[in-house]
Each structure stands twice: as structure tokens, then as C-alpha cells.
């Protein structure tokens, strides 16, 4: 390559970049562009030199010309954007438009499970309940023993438990029912509480998660009946799902309640026809409940001849699935950026 042509091009590029940097108005920028990159501009003249070079040197010089053109165009575009938004790179000479909107920070929101849990609690608070809490790392006594589930009781098989290694007798609570015991131990009776919280089980499928949330309810007084329990849960379902919610009570068994029941809500995905989500039953189980067993009251030093009560345990994710139309519980925990902002 002729050293002269190459050097002249380098000089042209460095002068052009300096001029592009210092230009102050869009009009001046456009006329500079014509002078540098126009059909009869300086770069076009350099391209014309190409023909005068020996053939074996044209390739390298042509490449250098194309790179020079791309570099100037890039600087031109950047400068144009800068002048159009009024943001000059040099702050000392900038004309700063303080009325321009700033970048919006992304606002965070409560997770859909927290939103649904808050909604559940608000309904019970309206009914006169107060909120209680208990530990997630629980002992065998509160999670099982005091709830009338002695060692080797077959009911322990109902819930596959995560035991804590090197801490005998401790486990991740499998339900929020141990809060019933802790509340009665601490506050005595009468009592009317709801206890939200995380619980853990070895479960994993579209309607079962190894970590999920329950809201426990406990009402103990001198004149509490099973009819009161049904009325309470019926009121809750209508408030939560609306007056047309199809809810059914089914007899069931829990060692800590007698009689016991489970409550199902008609599956919104198949409208009761049967599908993968409701395992073809047409209904999705959302809670367990019953009259507190006398053995549980006795474990808390409460006289069952004087006091009775009911308890219930709601599955927050199940209620959220039905309310929000989510057909796989695992979506709540994948935290996908296209999933969460919908709520
Ligand atoms: C219990 O946990 C009882 N402690 C409920 C109870 C409380 C009964 C007080 C009587 C008195 P169950 O195992 O059925 O019951 O769970 C209650 C609810 O939690 C279920 O109806 C369901 O909605 C939800 N649930 C259970 N397992 C899972 C899981 N792995 N993932 C998500 N939700 C679940």
C-alpha cells in the first residue's frame, strides 16, 4: 500500500473524530457529515484514490476505508443522539434539560402468595380473629405428640416429614396445627386466632409443593359448635371466591379433631368435569377442619368438659391457584419475570 494514502486516511479520520466531538448544534453536525461522508465528501475522495493503487494493495486499503467510514458514522450517530436529547457529554458545556423525565425505577410488589395470604387474613380479622405465629423449626411434641399423634401412630405416615439432622426431636413443621398448642399454652382460653406460615412436606407435583403455606384457625370458647365451624368457613368461602362459589364439606379424619371434615372447591379449570389439576375429581381440596379433640385440650391443660372449639387449616397455594387460575403450584416458586408481574 502507498504509505502516503494510508497515513493521509489516518489523519483524516482523527481530524474528523475531533470535529465530530466538538460540534455544538444539529445543523453544524449535518453539514459536517456532508463534508466528511457526502457523495463529494473527503471520504469519497479517499475512496477515489483506491483506483490509483496497484491491484495487490487495493484490498487492504479498501478495508481501512470501510473501517474509517464505519467509525465516523458511529460517532456521527452517537453525537446526533446526544444533541437531540440535550445531553452533552461534557458537563461543563452541557445544556441540561431538568424537565426531562428520569429513568423509572422498577417497582416491586408483594408475591401473589403473600397477596392471597393477606386477603385470607383480612377476612378472618373482620370476623374478630387475631394473628398468632409459631416457629417453622418445630419439636416433635408440638408437631405430633400434643396433637394426639403419638409415636408409631399410623397418622404420622399421612405427612412425610423433613427431620433435622443432628438435632434429635426437631423437624420442619408439617402443618400450622402446632401453633394451636403453643397459643393455648401461652394465652389459655377462650381464644380466637389465625396463624399463617410456611410448612414443609416431602411432596412434589402440580398441586403439591415441598414448601407451602397454611393458615391455621382456632376458636375455643364455652359454646362453640360444628355448625359454627361450617358457618365460619361458608362465610369465608363466599367472601374469598364470591357468592357463587361451589364448595363442599366431606367427612374426613384427623387425630386432633373429632368429628373432622375436608372442604373442596369446584375446580375452575374444568368446571367440575375432571382434569389433571383436580385429578379428575372435579374438586380441589383446600382445607381440613374439625372440632378440637378433647385429648388436645387436655394436653394444653384446658378442661374439655368446660371448653370446646373448632380448628381448621387452609392451604394458601391451593386457594391462590383457584382464585388466580394457576394450574401448576410450582409456577409460584419459579419466580419467572413474565409470571410475577401479572399479579
Ligand atoms: C392438615 O395439614 C391439618 N393440619 C389441617 C387441619 C387443621 C385439620 C386443623 C383439622 C384442624 P392437610 O394435610 O389436609 O391437613 O392439609 C391442609 C391443606 O393444605 C390441604 O387441604 C391443602 O389445601 C394444603 N396442602 C396439603 N399438602 C400440600 C402441599 N404439599 N402443597 C400445597 N398445599 C398442600
Image (tube, helix red, strand yellow):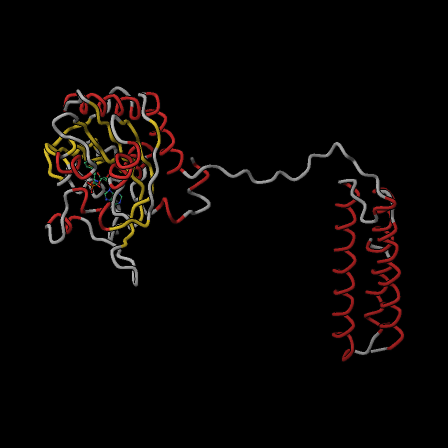
Q: Which residue sits at x=87%, y=48%?
A: 23
Q: In the rendered image, which quarter contains the C terminus?
A: top left
> Camera-side residue: 331 or 115?
115
**Camera-side residue: 306 or 243?**
306
User: How far across and how far down the image is residue 233, in percent?
Assistant: 22, 25
Residue 321 quadrant: top left
Q: Taking 174 as reference, is 255 left or right?
A: left
Q: Nearer the viewer, residue 321 or 39?
A: 321
Residue 121 pos. (x, y %): 35, 29
Q: Is residue 83 visible?
A: yes
User: In the displayed structure, would residue 95 be above or below residue 70?
Assistant: above
Q: Residue 84 occupies which quadrant of the picture?
A: top right
Q: Position of residue 307 (x, y in %)?
A: 17, 26
At x 16%, y 36%, the residue is 298
- Above or below — where is 41 with respect to 250? below
Q: Position of residue 302 (x, y in %)?
A: 19, 32
The N terminus, quarter of image: bottom right
Q: Is residue 284 visible?
A: no
Nearer the observer, 179 or 14: 179
Task: State the residue lying farthest toward the bottom.
Answer: 56
Q: Quadrant of residue 196?
A: top left
Residue at x-position 42% and y-position 39%:
111
Amino acid at each position: 500500500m502507498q504509505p502516503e494514502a494510508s497515513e493521509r486516511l489516518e489523519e483524516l479520520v482523527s481530524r474528523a473524530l475531533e470535529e465530530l466531538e466538538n460540534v455544538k448544534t444539529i445543523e453544524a453536525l449535518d453539514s459536517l457529515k456532508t463534508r466528511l461522508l457526502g457523495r463529494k465528501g473527503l471520504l469519497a475522495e479517499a475512496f477515489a484514490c483506491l483506483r490509483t493503487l496497484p491491484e495487490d494493495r487495493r484490498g487492504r486499503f479498501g478495508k481501512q476505508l470501510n473501517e474509517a467510514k464505519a467509525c465516523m458514522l458511529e460517532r456521527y450517530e452517537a453525537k446526533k443522539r446526544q444533541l437531540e436529547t440535550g445531553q452533552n457529554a461534557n458537563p461543563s458545556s452541557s445544556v441540561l434539560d431538568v424537565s426531562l423525565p428520569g429513568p423509572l425505577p422498577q417497582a416491586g410488589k408483594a408475591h401473589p402468595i403473600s397477596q392471597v395470604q393477606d386477603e385470607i387474613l383480612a377476612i378472618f380479622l373482620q370476623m374478630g380473629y387475631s394473628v398468632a405465629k409459631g416457629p417453622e423449626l418445630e419439636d416433635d411434641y408440638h408437631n405430633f405428640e400434643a396433637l394426639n399423634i403419638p409415636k408409631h401412630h399410623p397418622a404420622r405416615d399421612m405427612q412425610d416429614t423433613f427431620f433435622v439432622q443432628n438435632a434429635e426431636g426437631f423437624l420442619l413443621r408439617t402443618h400450622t396445627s402446632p401453633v394451636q398448642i403453643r397459643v393455648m399454652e401461652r394465652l389459655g382460653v377462650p381464644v380466637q386466632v389465625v396463624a399463617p406460615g410456611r410448612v414443609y412436606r416431602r411432596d412434589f407435583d402440580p398441586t403439591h409443593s415441598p414448601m407451602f403455606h397454611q393458615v391455621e384457625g382456632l376458636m375455643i370458647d364455652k359454646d362453640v359448635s360444628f355448625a359454627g365451624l361450617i358457618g365460619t368457613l361458608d362465610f369465608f368461602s363466599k367472601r374469598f371466591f364470591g357468592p357463587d362459589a361451589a364448595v363442599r364439606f366431606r367427612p374426613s379424619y384427623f387425630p386432633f379433631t373429632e368429628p373432622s371434615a375436608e372442604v373442596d372447591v369446584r375446580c375452575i379449570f374444568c368446571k367440575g368435569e375432571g382434569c389433571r389439576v383436580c385429578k379428575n375429581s372435579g374438586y380441589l381440596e383446600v382445607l381440613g377442619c374439625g372440632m378440637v379433640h378433647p385429648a388436645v385440650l387436655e394436653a394444653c391443660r384446658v378442661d374439655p368438659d368446660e371448653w370446646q372449639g373448632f380448628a381448621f387449616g387452609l392451604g394458601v397455594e391451593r386457594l391462590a391457584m383457584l382464585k388466580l387460575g394457576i394450574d401448576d403450584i410450582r409456577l409460584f416458586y419459579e419466580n419467572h419475570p413474565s409470571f410475577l408481574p401479572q399479579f
